[in-house]
Amino acid sequence: MMSATKNNLKKVLTTVALIIVLNFAGHFVFKRFDLTSDKRYTLSQTSLNIVSEVKEPLYIDVFLEGEFPGEFKKLQTETQQLLEEFKAENPNIIFQFVNPLEDEDQKVATLQSFMERGLTPVNVTVNDKGQQTQEIVFPWAVASCANRSVKVPLLKNMMGASTAEKVVSSVQHLEYAFANAINTVAKDKQKKVVILNGNGELQDRYMADFIKSVKDNYYIGPFTLDSVAKSPNETLKYLKKYDLAVIAKPTEAFTEEEKQVLDQFIISGGKTLWLVDQVNMEMDSLYNEMGSNLAFPRDLNLNDMFFKYGVRMRPDLIFDLQNTPIALATGEQGSATQYTQYPWFFSPMIYPTSKNPIVSNLDGIKFEFASPMEPLKNDIKKTVLLQSSQASKIIGTPSQISLTMVSLRPDRKEFESKGNYPVALLLEGQFHSMYQNRVLPFKDATFQNKGKNNKMIVISDGDVIKNQLDKNGQPLELGYDKWTNNLYANKEFLMNCVNYLLDDNGLINIRSKEVDLPILDKEKVYDTYTLSQVITVAVPIGILMLFGVVFTFLRKRKYSK
């Protein structure tokens, strides 16, 4: 009996000693294992590099807390597990989940405060076996470090998608969203973006939301090419101080001297984001007594420049059956004007099909009077980022455009063997100067015929970057259409363009990560509700009870001898 007691005591002491040794070793050796098939909790090397550079406490407040549907619980769980991975890599990452509406007395004030900060809540309908309730959810987080802070959207907007589909898409976006936020607040701005003026480009108020968004990560300022006429060399020298030039919807032709300045900016390594209208036509020009106007080619004197770089921009319009609606007044009822939404075939709704990280996992993007582009053969690598649908065709110009076209019901046979016209192209490689073997418009001692590796993005519609104004003249969010209350992915697309062009650490590539997130089919669960309860609740309890009975029986039989 004493021998058995000593053996048991020896086993207990050995177990305790082993636990102490393992805990002590665990203090110095840390390892986490990701057993998911898609490795969703394995941080990319880019994220690890960003997190490792956080030298002071960085706080992340996640407002996804409270009572809400199972889909949002899944988003909450995935967010928490991802942040735990960040914290495991660097203890300076500190996060907490907060319920902003926990205090009922301050609920209205809290809602107002969050709305003013741009943290828009989401009203969610909870369906539970036929019973519906409304819940308010804040799918947002805020990352703060020192005196800088940035908003982190946790739920992606996807028109027509179910909550479950939005959650799956959002989970794929989480690592990029938080890595980008950490990079924004933990690192000082380095790159410089310039908004070019002088050729009838969009006014700042129509690009206000884009400019505001760019400011979070980069220095940004305006620059006019008017000085080229008097001092082209000094203008070029100044422009080369910037890393990216945004040319948004110019309406006046560029001079040869201005083109040489832009050409040498590109050859010297400057990135460019072109948003160019090849056709003169605006929606506002249709709101007249006739309800129509003439669409005709716009000569910006840029065709030879784009041709040299490898793109032909056609002065035509895309007519697409996959489009965004417009709201037209259809009469008055009482004192209020009634508006009806109609399909507008000259406003293509572009859904990305490319796997490039710029457009991966993006919702529909709104274009307006877009023109087709043709990639040309040269040494430059070309990637079609966006293209019209298969059910699209080309309308030549000059052409009369009328609002009465909303009543058209085109025959799909008209679109056979057509469609898929590029409207956004990424060009990468060593660009050759358009003035190679030509007489220069002005003498430049630093002129180069061929540049180093560079990249640019060309978009055949200037309105992609244009935000609307509210009734007080204040800018609305880019991509939001106040007439139809639809929110398109224009803002995310353009920010991805900027990040890709200026991203030296590969942060944008995280967006290509694919996550396979299993979501329960509610209809199937409701159809087999009782069986589901038995499988998920009764069976595990039954197994435990069976194990307990067998274990007790075997123990009694062993020691009864």
Image (tube, helix red, strand yellow):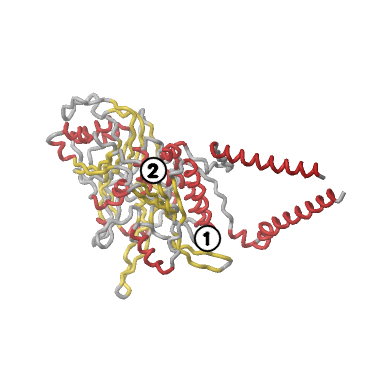
Image quadrant holding the N terminus, namely top right
- Residue 228: x and y in percent read 16, 36
Locate residue 12 relative to residue 292 in the image: left or right. Answer: right
Which residue occupies 28% across, 48% down? 211
| Nearer to me, 314 or 370 | 370
Q: On the image, which quarter does residue 527 sit in? A: bottom right
Task: Choose the circle earlier in sequence order: 2 or 1.
Answer: 2
The type of residue carrying mark 1 is Pro
Q: Nearer the viewer, residue 305 or 299?
A: 305
Q: Which residue is mark 1?
A: 69
Mark 2: secondary structure = loop
Q: Residue furthest left?
A: 230
Vertical order, 165 against 179 (above or below): below
Residue 376 placed where, x, y %?
Answer: 35, 33
Q: From the viewer's perspective, is residue 105 above or below residue 368? A: below
**Residue 319 visible in the current orientation:** no
Q: Name the residue furthest bottom.
A: 334
Residue type at the position of mark 2: Glu
Residue 459 seen in render: yes
Label 1 crowd bin: few (<14), some (14–19), many (20+), radius 10 Å? some
Outermost residue, front direction? 2
Give how far across and how far down residue 417 sits, in percent: 44, 43
